[in-house]
Image (cartoon, coloured by chain):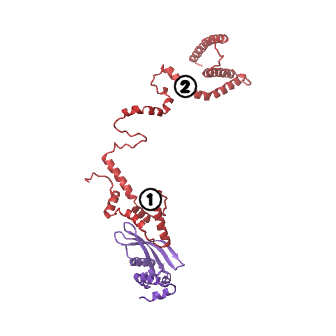
Amino acid sequence: MSTEEITEAVNLLSAVESQTQDVTKLVDHLLKKATENEYNTSKGISFLELKYQLLLSYLMNLTYISLQKSQGSSIQDDPTIDRLIEIRTVLEKMRPIDKKLKYQVDKVVRTAASGGTDSSDPLRYRANPENLISKLDDESESESEGEEKKSKIYHPPKLTAMHYEGDETEMDKDQKVLERAKKRALSTSMLRELREEFSEGPTEIRETTSTQRSRAERKLRERTHYEEENFMRFSVSKKDKGKKGKKAKQIISKKFVYDYMKPIFVSNVAKSPD
Amino acid sequence: AATIRTRKFMTNRLLCRKQMIVDVLHPGKATIPKTEVREKLAKMYKTTPDVIFCFGFRTKFGGGKTSGFGLIYDSLDFAKKFEPKYRLQRHGLVEIKKTGRKQRKERKNRQKKVRGTKKAKVGAGKK
């Protein structure tokens, strides 16, 4: 060992000696206090106090064990080990309770550290149960007063969230209209039938529930099915002729078809002088 | 320019014929006459057009597509045996004698005046 290390060791040992003297003085003081029943334990000790007492005793026992081991004496059948085990189990059992108290403890610690709380601390807010009670009973009483207070402008009640359209430009609106027209044109029965004809996949029979025309369409479908099965044609009664006439009143001329299908071929909206 | 497609093809062995649904696509034109449809079907199924009987052609709303029925018999004899008279008459194979509507009604009215077997005698002699 070098001289530096020796001097360092000597210094440390002397420090240890002085500190042990202080510690013994403190311990004697505490012992006197404890024997004179200055610490009132009639109501039991608090959870937090128990926690640090247990930790302290755990440390003491641990140091005793390590002392024994450094001296070379065996620790077999030493009651210290039982004590250690007991303290350890209690600490383990305390852990979930400690977790539940964690929020409160942290808050208190933070308050202590920051030196007081300000009223606008967001953690101070909690639910106000009075706001949850419906106050409908008050409305009937205030009706007579309310008529005078009613404003001239009608404000519709805000029940659901509505789409906001204020930020759309003119071009965006035109584009949207065009897209919608395109979608509608693509899904006409004409194109759908063409697609069905030329597609190589199997025919799909889909169940659609269009409530408006479901009955009429179902009847028509039944009729055509019967006709095709039995190789005959029904004679159209006057009533049916009238019904077919209603649809026929939308005269599908070539120009109409062209205008309807035009959106499919328009790729983008340009400001046309229409 | 007309296209013919057949659907729901079935060989009816009992009536010695092939029956199908005929779809005619004729965009921009009027409905195609039945004789032309028969010609086209004959070409498709490699037979003579005289054993082919088409009927019930209905054009879909808006034009361009017509659906009807078609029967192709194995031979003309079978056709004459199984087809109804009015369809054979359309092909000119059978002549249906019609006495005229007015004549029939007048005969009926004359028959009303008589009772029993004399009705037949009345009808025979048209006054």
- Judge if badges 2 and 1 mark residues of a common chain: yes
Q: Residue at x 42, y 66 (%)?
A: A239
Report the quarter where the N terminus of chain B lies: bottom left
**Amino acid on which disc 2 is placed:** Gln
Chain under callout 1? A
Judging by the rendered image, the residue that carries numbered circle 2 is A104
User: x%, y% of residue B40?
Assistant: 41, 77
User: x%, y% of residue B12?
Assistant: 52, 76
Question: In which image quadrant can residue A210 be found?
Answer: bottom left
User: x%, y% of residue A48?
Assistant: 60, 22
Report crowding for label 2: few under 14, some 14 to 19, many 20 or more residues within 10 A (C-alpha). few
**Amino acid on which disc 1 is placed:** Arg
Task: Decide if residue A119 is on the left or right side of residue A169.
Answer: right
Disc 2, SS:
helix
Chain identifier for the red-coloured part of the image: A
Question: Is residue A113 shown to the viewer in this render?
Answer: yes
Task: Decide if residue B78 is on the left or right side of residue A176.
Answer: right
Chain under callout 2? A
Image: A175 above or below A156 = below
Judging by the rendered image, the residue that carries numbered circle 1 is A213
Chain identifier for the purple-coloured part of the image: B
Disc 1, SS:
loop
Circle nearer the N terminus (2, 1): 2
Distance Cα–Cα, label 2 vs label 1: 65 Å
Question: In which image quadrant can residue A43 be found?
Answer: top right
